[in-house]
Amino acid sequence: MTFTDFETVVELRRYTLHPGRRDELIELFEREFVEPQEAAGAHLFGLFRSRAAPDEFVWLRGFRSLAERKAALEEFYSGPVWRRFRDTANATMIGSDNVLLLRPVRSGLASPPPGAGVYVTVSSLSPPPESAFAAFETEPSPNNFPQLPVRTDGPFSVWFSREPGGLELAPTARSLIR
Protein backbone atom coordinates (compact mmCIF):
# COMPACT_ATOMS: atom_id res chain seq x y z
CA MET A 1 0.00 0.00 0.00
CA THR A 2 1.11 3.53 -0.73
CA PHE A 3 0.03 6.72 0.98
CA THR A 4 -2.04 7.49 -2.13
CA ASP A 5 -4.21 4.48 -1.24
CA PHE A 6 -5.39 6.46 1.78
CA GLU A 7 -6.97 9.10 -0.47
CA THR A 8 -9.94 6.83 -1.25
CA VAL A 9 -11.93 8.27 1.67
CA VAL A 10 -10.80 11.55 3.24
CA GLU A 11 -12.16 13.55 6.13
CA LEU A 12 -11.57 17.30 6.04
CA ARG A 13 -12.00 18.28 9.69
CA ARG A 14 -12.22 21.90 10.86
CA TYR A 15 -12.37 22.45 14.61
CA THR A 16 -13.32 25.74 16.24
CA LEU A 17 -11.41 26.12 19.48
CA HIS A 18 -11.76 28.23 22.59
CA PRO A 19 -9.73 31.43 22.18
CA GLY A 20 -6.02 30.92 22.69
CA ARG A 21 -6.18 27.11 22.97
CA ARG A 22 -5.20 26.03 19.44
CA ASP A 23 -1.53 25.40 20.21
CA GLU A 24 -2.53 23.41 23.29
CA LEU A 25 -4.68 21.09 21.16
CA ILE A 26 -2.06 20.79 18.42
CA GLU A 27 0.64 19.84 20.94
CA LEU A 28 -1.62 17.18 22.50
CA PHE A 29 -2.78 15.95 19.10
CA GLU A 30 0.70 15.59 17.66
CA ARG A 31 2.09 13.98 20.82
CA GLU A 32 -0.74 11.53 21.58
CA PHE A 33 -3.14 11.03 18.64
CA VAL A 34 -1.17 10.61 15.40
CA GLU A 35 0.49 7.22 15.96
CA PRO A 36 -2.51 5.50 17.57
CA GLN A 37 -4.79 6.55 14.70
CA GLU A 38 -2.28 5.37 12.12
CA ALA A 39 -1.84 2.07 13.98
CA ALA A 40 -5.64 1.65 13.79
CA GLY A 41 -5.62 2.10 9.99
CA ALA A 42 -6.06 5.84 9.38
CA HIS A 43 -3.48 8.07 7.73
CA LEU A 44 -3.06 11.66 8.83
CA PHE A 45 -1.92 13.72 5.83
CA GLY A 46 -2.22 17.24 7.04
CA LEU A 47 -2.38 19.07 10.32
CA PHE A 48 -2.80 22.82 9.94
CA ARG A 49 -3.39 26.13 11.58
CA SER A 50 -5.81 28.30 9.65
CA ARG A 51 -4.03 31.58 8.89
CA ALA A 52 -7.36 33.46 8.76
CA ALA A 53 -8.82 32.07 12.00
CA PRO A 54 -6.51 31.97 15.03
CA ASP A 55 -8.81 29.56 16.85
CA GLU A 56 -9.24 26.99 14.08
CA PHE A 57 -7.43 23.66 13.68
CA VAL A 58 -7.80 21.98 10.27
CA TRP A 59 -6.76 18.42 9.63
CA LEU A 60 -7.06 15.61 7.11
CA ARG A 61 -7.49 11.93 7.82
CA GLY A 62 -7.54 9.35 5.03
CA PHE A 63 -8.63 5.74 4.71
CA ARG A 64 -8.40 2.99 2.09
CA SER A 65 -12.19 2.44 2.08
CA LEU A 66 -15.35 3.25 4.00
CA ALA A 67 -15.20 -0.16 5.68
CA GLU A 68 -11.61 0.48 6.81
CA ARG A 69 -12.66 3.94 8.01
CA LYS A 70 -15.29 2.41 10.24
CA ALA A 71 -12.89 -0.20 11.64
CA ALA A 72 -10.12 2.35 12.26
CA LEU A 73 -12.44 4.82 13.98
CA GLU A 74 -14.00 2.10 16.14
CA GLU A 75 -10.54 0.94 17.22
CA PHE A 76 -9.17 4.40 17.98
CA TYR A 77 -12.25 5.88 19.70
CA SER A 78 -12.76 2.80 21.89
CA GLY A 79 -9.06 2.55 22.71
CA PRO A 80 -7.03 3.60 25.74
CA VAL A 81 -5.40 6.69 24.22
CA TRP A 82 -8.68 8.38 23.33
CA ARG A 83 -10.23 7.41 26.68
CA ARG A 84 -7.21 8.90 28.49
CA PHE A 85 -7.02 12.21 26.57
CA ARG A 86 -10.51 12.89 25.18
CA ASP A 87 -11.62 15.17 28.01
CA THR A 88 -8.45 17.25 27.69
CA ALA A 89 -8.85 17.50 23.89
CA ASN A 90 -12.58 18.22 24.05
CA ALA A 91 -12.03 20.98 26.63
CA THR A 92 -10.14 22.99 23.97
CA MET A 93 -13.01 22.81 21.47
CA ILE A 94 -16.14 24.84 20.84
CA GLY A 95 -17.12 22.76 17.81
CA SER A 96 -15.80 19.69 16.00
CA ASP A 97 -18.69 18.94 13.63
CA ASN A 98 -17.48 20.91 10.57
CA VAL A 99 -16.42 17.73 8.80
CA LEU A 100 -16.67 16.76 5.15
CA LEU A 101 -16.46 13.13 4.10
CA LEU A 102 -14.85 13.12 0.65
CA ARG A 103 -13.85 10.90 -2.26
CA PRO A 104 -11.14 11.76 -4.81
CA VAL A 105 -11.68 13.41 -8.15
CA ARG A 106 -7.92 13.86 -8.52
CA SER A 107 -5.37 12.32 -6.09
CA GLY A 108 -2.35 14.25 -4.94
CA LEU A 109 -2.46 14.84 -1.18
CA ALA A 110 0.21 12.22 -0.63
CA SER A 111 2.63 13.88 -3.03
CA PRO A 112 1.92 17.58 -3.50
CA PRO A 113 4.07 19.39 -6.04
CA PRO A 114 7.03 21.41 -4.82
CA GLY A 115 6.28 24.95 -3.84
CA ALA A 116 5.19 27.13 -1.00
CA GLY A 117 1.75 27.65 0.43
CA VAL A 118 -1.16 25.28 0.92
CA TYR A 119 -4.68 26.46 0.21
CA VAL A 120 -7.96 24.56 0.52
CA THR A 121 -11.16 25.63 -1.19
CA VAL A 122 -14.63 24.28 -0.43
CA SER A 123 -17.21 25.15 -3.08
CA SER A 124 -20.79 24.18 -3.78
CA LEU A 125 -20.67 25.72 -7.25
CA SER A 126 -17.23 25.56 -8.81
CA PRO A 127 -15.30 22.58 -10.14
CA PRO A 128 -11.63 22.33 -9.17
CA PRO A 129 -9.20 24.27 -11.36
CA GLU A 130 -6.41 22.50 -13.25
CA SER A 131 -3.92 24.09 -10.85
CA ALA A 132 -5.27 22.02 -7.92
CA PHE A 133 -2.87 19.27 -6.87
CA ALA A 134 -5.68 17.26 -5.24
CA ALA A 135 -9.44 17.46 -5.69
CA PHE A 136 -12.35 15.78 -3.96
CA GLU A 137 -16.12 15.72 -3.92
CA THR A 138 -18.55 14.90 -1.18
CA GLU A 139 -18.79 11.15 -0.55
CA PRO A 140 -22.47 10.27 -1.18
CA SER A 141 -22.47 7.15 1.02
CA PRO A 142 -23.97 7.47 4.48
CA ASN A 143 -21.63 8.16 7.37
CA ASN A 144 -20.77 4.69 8.66
CA PHE A 145 -19.43 6.00 11.99
CA PRO A 146 -22.27 8.25 13.22
CA GLN A 147 -20.58 8.90 16.56
CA LEU A 148 -18.56 11.45 14.56
CA PRO A 149 -21.02 13.59 12.58
CA VAL A 150 -20.23 14.74 9.05
CA ARG A 151 -21.89 17.54 7.12
CA THR A 152 -24.79 16.61 4.88
CA ASP A 153 -25.51 20.07 3.45
CA GLY A 154 -23.53 19.45 0.22
CA PRO A 155 -22.61 18.41 -2.30
CA PHE A 156 -19.23 20.13 -2.28
CA SER A 157 -16.09 20.23 -4.34
CA VAL A 158 -12.90 20.53 -2.31
CA TRP A 159 -9.46 21.16 -3.72
CA PHE A 160 -5.92 21.82 -2.57
CA SER A 161 -3.61 24.18 -4.40
CA ARG A 162 -0.34 26.05 -4.13
CA GLU A 163 -1.98 29.13 -5.62
CA PRO A 164 -3.57 31.71 -3.32
CA GLY A 165 -7.30 31.32 -2.95
CA GLY A 166 -9.51 29.62 -0.46
CA LEU A 167 -8.35 29.09 3.09
CA GLU A 168 -4.60 29.45 3.60
CA LEU A 169 -3.24 26.64 5.77
CA ALA A 170 -0.04 26.72 7.82
CA PRO A 171 1.35 23.20 8.35
CA THR A 172 2.12 22.13 11.90
CA ALA A 173 5.38 20.33 12.73
CA ARG A 174 3.91 16.89 11.97
CA SER A 175 1.98 17.73 8.80
CA LEU A 176 3.03 15.67 5.80
CA ILE A 177 1.59 18.27 3.44
CA ARG A 178 3.87 21.29 3.52
Image (cartoon, rainbow, N blue to C red):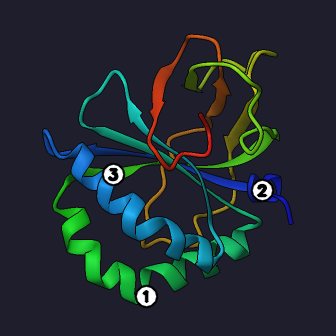
Residue 158 pos. (x, y %): 63, 32
- Tell me the number on the disc at residue 79: 1
Q: Work out whether mark 1 precedes mark 2 in sequence or the reverse, and give the earlier one.
A: 2
Residue 63 pos. (x, y %): 69, 63
* Residue marked by disc 3: 26
* Residue marked by disc 2: 3
Classify 10 Å Cα crowding around label 2: few (below 14), some (14-19), many (20 and above): some
Q: Is residue 89 left or right of residue 178?
A: left
SS class, disc 3:
helix
Indicate the quadrant containing the N terminus: top left, top right, bottom left or bottom right: bottom right
Nearer the observer, disc 1 or disc 2? Answer: 2
Quick one: 126 or 50, which is closer to the camera? 50
Q: Work out whether mark 2 precedes mark 3 in sequence or the reverse, and give the earlier one.
A: 2
Nearer the observer, disc 3 or disc 1? Answer: 3
Disc 3 to disc 1: CB gap under 8 Å: no
Q: CA distance from mark 3 to mark 1?
A: 20 Å
Q: Amino acid at mark 2?
A: Phe
Find residue 89 and report its image quarter.
bottom left
Disc 1 to disc 2: CB gap under 8 Å: no
Q: CA distance from mark 2 to mark 3?
A: 23 Å
Classify 10 Å Cα crowding around label 3: few (below 14), some (14-19), many (20 and above): many
